[in-house]
Amino acid sequence: MNILDFLRVLRANRLVLLGGVVLGLLGGLVYSLLQPTLYTSTSTGFVTVAGEASISGTETALTRAQSYVPLINSRTVREKVAESGVDVSGSTLSAQVVPKSNLITVTALAPDPQRAADLANTALGATAEVANSLDPTSNVKVTAMEDALPPAGPSSPDHLRNALIGAGIGLLAALAVAFLRRILDVNVRTTTDATEASGAGLLGAIPQDGTMKAERTAPLGVPSPRAAEALRQLRTNLRFAAVDDPPRVVMVTSSNPGEGKSTVIAGLAQAVAVSGQPVILVDADLRRPRQASQFGVDGRVGLSEVLSGDVLLEDAVQDLGDGLLLLPAGRTPPNPSEQLGSHRMQELLRVLAETHLVLVDAPPVLPVTDSTLLAAVVDGTVLVVRHGKTRKDHLEVARDMLAKVNARMLGVVLNGVPASGVGSDYYGGGYGADGGSYDVYYQAPRDAADAAAGTAGDTSRR
């Protein structure tokens, strides 16, 4: 994974990251609010030995000061402090010796500011008493140098620090979730996923667009400018997929149903026809035909009747205008695989290819064997992959099944690419462009057409 992949994962999971930070922030704040409020106060004294007045510390004083530190939290010292009238419940004591001196500091942590100060002031003297009681011959004395004062505010909990720590933990957890999702994700979400799993080059990427997602019984709408441009790009790439041996019969299929192959091939057929190249769209999905309903024509007579010899080819083909012909699927026969794998089907495609570019809408590869039979007789195969829906392992199985019949793979089409997130670079969702930055290019031809229409109108009025 390179830096761009890293940034794409962050972009695609930005809501997860934001949620992790917010939850961590709230969790840290709640944790902080549940902690008891504590106050810290510190007193300072110096240890002297009778007859040795040096404040900088003699060897005996330094040794004694060091020996007092472990006694601070002893039960005996706490009892001495309690005898002086200071409440030691819920409090802690700590001590340390200032390096290279006989100064000793005692820090008290208590739930009350005055109690913290009293505890710090009495603890050092109590420690000295306990030490002297253990060694009656000792001539060591602890002198208060700086009394502890009640603190102005609590030292714990630090709400800001705890909230920031919680936000950091939440961010790390969200990052772990984001990268686990990416690593464990079995669906195709990038062009790299599509090309690696299919073993073929990328022919095009169709945007996630309402005009490219028709209901099963609804006719096709007019593609949006962005979708139309993607289809034209697919048309161009398909022409240059094999310059030395251009395919005349191209099959478009997918690994599973619902990946948009029928909508993509219909849009591609329209784009090819508009370019001036004669094209015929053959609906070879005899089990679940789509093209007749997508183009709003009668599909009761079509490929099935032609293959069975009940209807002549010219009687079944429908002219949709602009050089686009459609051969619907017709009725569903009891033996679709046998019909599609027959010599009559092979001869039909050969005849159609003499005058037209033939685009064949084939069934999905995994559910039935129809597509593998067709792949052996067409000039090339295009696989349509649905972004976020097609599984990588399913695409790999479909690739292997087509390879077993020596299918000629022309490329893969990634369908339903979102305008933002992982795999969105084609449509302004990547780095350096936003979702609307391409609209000016799509609008320019329409502006020119409107201007030309306006000029023609002015001329006619003259």
Image: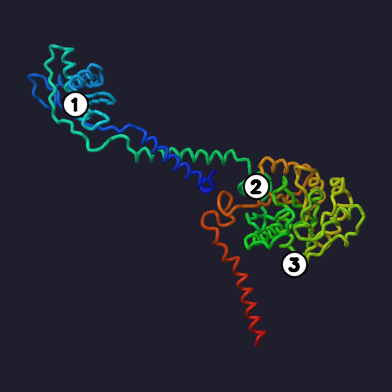
Residue 259 circle label: none
Left or right of 237? Residue 245 is right
- Of marks 3 and 2, which one's residue comes earlier in the chain? 2
Residue 461 higher or lower than 335, as above or below: below
| Quarter of the view holding residue 265 | bottom right
Residue, x 67% and y 84% (percent of image)? 460
For the residues labelled 1 and 2, the Cα–Cα distance comes to 70 Å
Q: Nearer the viewer, residue 415 or 39?
A: 39
Where the N terminus falls, by quadrant? top right
Image x and y of residue 277, in percent: 76, 65
Residue on which disc 3 sits: 276
Q: Amino acid at mark 3?
A: Gly
For the residues labelled 3 and 2, the Cα–Cα distance comes to 31 Å
For the residues labelled 1 and 3, the Cα–Cα distance comes to 96 Å
Asked which secondary structure carries label 2, the reply is: helix
Image x and y of residue 98, in percent: 20, 28
Residue 104 circle label: 1
Return the residue found at the far left.
51
Residue, x 64% and y 62% (percent of image)? 224
Where the C terminus falls, by quadrant? bottom right
- Of marks 1 and 2, which one's residue comes earlier in the chain? 1
Q: Nearer the viewer, residue 53 or 436?
A: 436
Foreground disc of the pair 1, 2: 1
Foreground disc of the pair 1, 3: 1
Residue on which disc 2 sits: 194
Q: Amino acid at mark 1?
A: Ile
Asked which secondary structure carries label 1, the reply is: strand
Residue, x 87% and y 45% (percent of image)? 335
Q: Rate crowding at label 1 as few (under 14), some (14 to 19) or many (20 or more) other CA atoms within 10 Å.
A: many
Image x and y of residue 427, in percent: 58, 57
Q: Rate crowding at label 3 as few (under 14), some (14 to 19) or many (20 or more) other CA atoms within 10 Å.
A: few
